[in-house]
Image: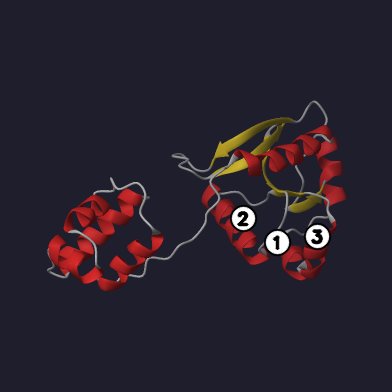
Amino acid sequence: MLTAIGEALRNARLEAGLSQRELGSLVGISHSQISRIERGILRRVPYETIAIIGATLGLDVPLRAFLNGDPVRDAGQLALLKRFRALLPASVRHRTEVPIGPTGGFRAWDEVVEGPGWTLPVEAESRIHDVQALQRKLALKCRDAGVDRMLLVVADTRHNRHVLRLAADDFGAAFPLRGHEALADLRAGRRPSASSVLLV
């Protein structure tokens, strides 16, 4: 991250026609520190410093948090998937963290369940935070994976039930099959006929 930000700052500085010394003078730090930031070798850079350098160069340097598969977060998700698997017959196999597309990259299904001649991608959500962001993420995954249905496994909590009730119209369109019907299909060794949300 620091290397990428440093490179963006360096490119903006060069486009502005400023030397490292001139930029350092404008923002109140040494040119050698500017050099280390640009090369990504200054490991402890206050966000405020990066933001000030960016603003001086006409850049907006937003600070955002992204999920990175931290083990603490994964623990809840893994427990949820374990409860889900306990509902399935032995004939339905599963694979976890299945890459999307031929190259995979960082995007993957949380799990894929498989029966005779069929597969079904599964996403697990311990706590739903942003319904629209979740719907966009899932729609993009389905599009990029070329699948027409999936299963969204959600922890059965009061919070999640409340969110799903509030978003019933949107989720109903994207996940038309009722959870108990999808589960009945899976228990019978069949792929569900449509996307579904399953509270576990």
How far is mark 1 from mark 2, CA to CA? Answer: 10 Å
Kindly check if marks 3 and 2 are in contact, taking CB atoms under 8 A apart as contact.
no
Marks 3, 2: nearer the viewer: 3
Q: Quadrant of residue 178?
A: bottom right
Q: Earlier in the sequence, mark 1 or mark 2?
A: 2
- Which one is in front, 138 or 33? 33
Amino acid type shown at disc 2: Leu
- Whole-number angstrom distance, CA of label 3 to CA of label 2: 20 Å
Mark 1 surroundings: few (<14), some (14-19) or many (≥20) residues within 10 A: some
Tell me residue 190's x, y (percent). 79, 38
Label 3 to label 1: alpha-carbon separation: 20 Å
Q: Amino acid at mark 1?
A: Ala
Instruction: State the SS at label 3.
Output: helix
> Which residue has dot 1 on it?
174
Which quadrant of the figure has residue 112? top right
Q: Under tag 1, what secondary structure?
A: helix
Q: Which residue is mark 2?
A: 138
Q: Position of residue 126 (x, y in %)?
A: 73, 49
Residue highlighted by disc 3: 159
- If you read the primary sequence from the N terminus, does the residue marked by circle 3 or circle 2 appear first? 2
How many labels were placed on the picture? 3
Q: Position of residue 182 (x, y in %)?
A: 81, 47
Q: Residue at x 52, y 57 (%)?
A: 65
